[in-house]
């Protein structure tokens, strides 16, 4: 199942706003930048994979894996956030599980996820 295109950040000014007005945290494989935007009904995300990571095949593989991580945790992400996920130089050697673990750790640290429902 694909992520809807309205969840993707497409404009350079949106990326720049997250960088200038938001906050960020670095992990082993990723850097996560976030900005609270109250008027968003859901969330928006953007991916950055720089040329230093490798050729187009490598960069596209990383983007596919990161989209899969976001798709898998879509229901857990709180609405009203813009996030930019930047792949670090170690990302090409990471597995899906390692990227997911790193992203979840950063998302929890940035309060990006909805609180877990407390059961009886």
Image (cartoon, rainbow, N blue to C red):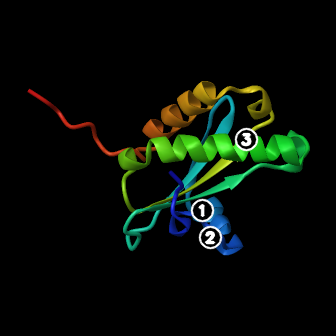
Element type at marker 2?
A: helix
Q: Dot 2: few (<14), some (14–19), or many (≥20) neighbours within 10 Å?
A: some
Q: How far is mark 2 from mark 1, CA to CA?
A: 6 Å
Name the quadrant containing residue 91.
top right
Q: Which residue is drawn at 50% across and 47% down?
A: 71
| Residue labelled with disc 3 | 62
Real-space CA distance between mark 1 and mark 3, rounded to the nearest whole angstrom? 21 Å
Say which of 64 and 35 sits in front.
64
Of the two numbered discs 2 and 3 on the same chain, state the one appearing first in sequence: 2
Q: Count the marks.
A: 3
Q: Mark 2 sits on what residue?
A: 14
The picture places residue 100, in percent across and down from the top left corner, at 56, 32
Pointer 1 residue: 18
Camera-nearest label, 1 or 3: 3
Write down the quadrant of residue 57 in the picture: top right
- Nearer to the camera, 100 or 5: 5
Q: Which residue is drawn at 62% across and 43% down?
A: 66
Image height check: is 78 above or below 94?
below
**In-front residue for pair 18/60:** 60
Image depth: mark 2 or mark 3 in front: 3
Which percent across, then down, holds residue 37? 44, 67
Q: Which residue lies furthest to the left in this view?
A: 120
Q: Do the residues labelled 2 and 1 touch (CB within 8 Å)?
A: yes
Quadrant in which the C terminus appears? top left
Q: Distance between the residues labelled 2 and 3?
A: 21 Å
The residue carrying pointer 1 sits among few (fewer than 14), some (14 to 19) or many (20 or more) residues within 10 Å by Cα, namely many
In terms of secondary structure, where does tag 3 sit? Answer: helix
Q: Which badge, 1 or 3, comes first in the chain's sequence?
A: 1
Residue at screen point 40% across, 63% down: 42
x and y percent of residue 64 in the render?
67, 45
Helix, strand or loop at label 1? It is helix
């Amino acid at each position: 199942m694909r992520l809807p295109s309205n969840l993707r950040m497409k404009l350079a000014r949106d990326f720049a706003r997250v960088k200038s007005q938001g906050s960020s945290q670095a992990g082993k494989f990723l850097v996560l930048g976030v900005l609270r935007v109250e008027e968003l009904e859901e969330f928006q995300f953007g991916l950055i994979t720089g040329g230093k990571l490798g050729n187009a095949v490598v960069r596209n593989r990383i983007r596919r894996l990161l989209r899969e991580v976001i798709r898998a945790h879509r229901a857990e992400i709180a609405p009203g956030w813009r996030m930019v996920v930047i792949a670090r130089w170690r990302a090409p050697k990471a597995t899906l599980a390692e990227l997911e673990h790193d992203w979840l750790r950063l998302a929890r640290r940035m309060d990006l996820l909805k609180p877990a429902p407390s059961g009886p």
